Image: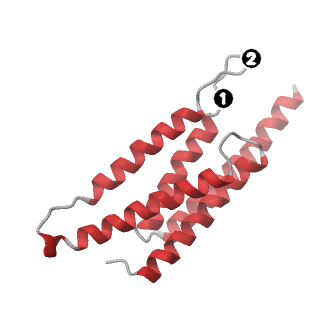
Amino acid sequence: MIDTQTFLLRAMIAIVLGGIIGIDREIKNKPLGLRAYMLIALGSASVCMMSINMASSVEETGLAFDLSRSVQGIVGGIGFLGAGAIMSRNEDGRLRGVASGSAIWLVGVVGIGVGFGLLIESAVLSVAALLILTVVAQARDKTLNAD
């Protein structure tokens, strides 16, 4: 069972970790910015924490509860958000929004990790995503400008 103090702490951590990725998207003026990424991480973490609490009350209620279904629902729902970010093509025919769609999906995974108490792993994912979104983008831009 997750107590209120732990719930609040994990919720705040989810907001911060989602914000780490969202700040890059905000700075680059992407359609989904800081608030969206923070909310996705918070929502994912909250569903997991509430699911843990529901599962821990199984003995009292006699109901069965499968935590993996919560994760499946989150991943599926976030897939729709990510797909919405990948809806148009550039003038050169390339898809736009693929990085944003991928980042949305990853932020959902970060939220799931935080919700289940995997704080170090979630922090590593957030920092790795930020590095990928910034360093790889800079390398790509240098390559494109060199041509």
Q: Quadrant of residue 34?
A: bottom right
Q: Amino acid at mark 1?
A: Arg
Amino acid, disc 2: Glu
Q: Is residue 78 above or below residue 47?
A: above
Q: CA distance from mark 2 to mark 1?
A: 10 Å
Q: How many marks?
A: 2
Q: Which element carries disc 1, helix, strand or loop?
A: loop
Query: Which residue, given by chain and number where applicable, does mark 1 sit on?
Result: 96
Q: In this figure, which residue is indicated by the disc labeled 2?
A: 91
Mark 2 closeness class: few <14, some 14–19, many ≥20 residues within 10 Å:
few
- Residue 40 drawn at (x, y percent): 53, 53
Q: Position of residue 138 (x, y in %)?
A: 79, 43
- In the rendered image, the residue lying farthest to the right is 146
Q: With 39 as the anchor, is 75 left or right in this view?
A: left
Query: Can you tell which mark lies on residue 30?
Result: none
Q: Secondary structure at mark 2?
A: loop
Residue 67 percent across, percent down from the top left: 28, 60
Q: Residues within 10 Å of mark 1 (few under 14, many from 20)?
A: some
Task: Tell me the quarter of the picture where residue 90 sits.
Answer: top right
Viewer-nearest residue: 144 or 58: 58
Identify the residue at image location x=53%, y=39%. 82
> Looking at this rendering, what residue extends furthest in the left direction?
62
**Residue occupying the point 69% across, 47% down:** 133
